[in-house]
Image: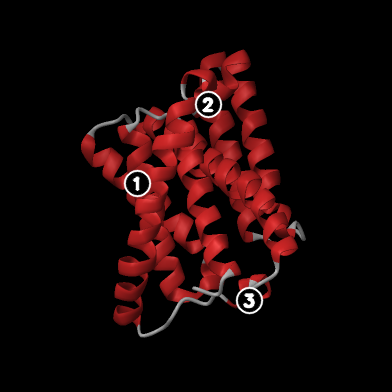
Amino acid sequence: MKTSLLKTKIVPLISAIIIGIIFTVPLGLGNFTNIVATLLLILASFISYGSDGFKSLGISNFKDQKREFFVYAPILAIILFMFYAYALVPGTTKLTGQPIDYSEFSSLIGNLPACAVLLVYIWISAAFGEEIIWRGYFMRHFVRFFGDRIPVLVVNIILFGIVFGYLHSYQGITGQIVTGIIGMILAFIFYKRKYNLWFNIAIHGFFDTIAVIYMYNGWI
């Protein structure tokens, strides 16, 4: 078996199976599920690409992207959150007849310490973790397997958007649909930004930061 086949085809397939097990089989990982999955896929990337492991995920040259990370991404995150909160959620709720289930976050209202801890967690688990898993690793490998023709990219974006939404099932059907659509938008941004994961990480992190601020104030 050629080494390139092992690294670019076999390792990703094995990784996909392992990640599928992690997210579907109750292993008792709880809130550490994303973190464990992220670490495994970073390891898989280094096995496949050696010292270019992070680069293969779209993570490189942060010092040249500070303005985009700290200025442009937060602005886009605000726009995306406004669309989410005041158009997408109300519209989807009207369609399904079921509001998003935010009960898991009810303890955050007025609870500054809990919100602070959650902010650290979401930057690690959601911003970095989910972007590495679903955009940096699986979206990139989908392209490596099947190419980057428009029909393939459409399937790629829709497929992992659906998976992304499914993993937020604790928010109910409306939450799944809304999160799936946000996942597709993030995937499209990742593609348009030429697979620059730093930009996606920043948008995701600042989006969730705004969400925590809203939850603290009881606005959602």
Q: Amino acid at mark 2?
A: Ile
For the point 60% across and 43% down, which residue is it? Answer: 129
Label 2 and label 1: CA atoms lie apart by 20 Å
Look at the picture and state if 200 lies above or below 50.
below
Q: Residue at x 75, y 56 (%)?
A: 29
Secondary structure of the residue carrying numbered label 3? helix
Q: Which residue shows up at 36% across the image and 53% down it?
A: 80
Identify whether 112 is placed above or below 96: above
Q: Is residue 61 left or right of residue 139?
A: right
Of callouts 2 and 3, which one flags the residue occurring earlier in the amino acid sequence? Answer: 2
Front residue of 4/96: it is: 96
**Quadrant housing residue 173:** bottom left
Residue holding disc 1: 157
Label 1 neighbourhood size at 10 Å, few (<14), some (14-19), many (20+)? many
Q: Residue at left 63%, top 76%?
A: 106
Where 184 falls versus 42 (above or below)? below
Residue type at mark 3 is Ser
Q: Are marks 1 and 3 in contact (CB under 8 Å)?
A: no
- Residue assigned mark 3: 106
Query: Closer to the camera: disc 2 or disc 1?
Result: 2
The residue at which mark 2 appears reads as 59
Q: Residues within 10 Å of mark 3 (few under 14, many from 20)?
A: some
Snapshot colouring = secondary structure
Amino acid at the residue labelled 1: Ile
Disc 2 to disc 3, C-alpha distance: 34 Å
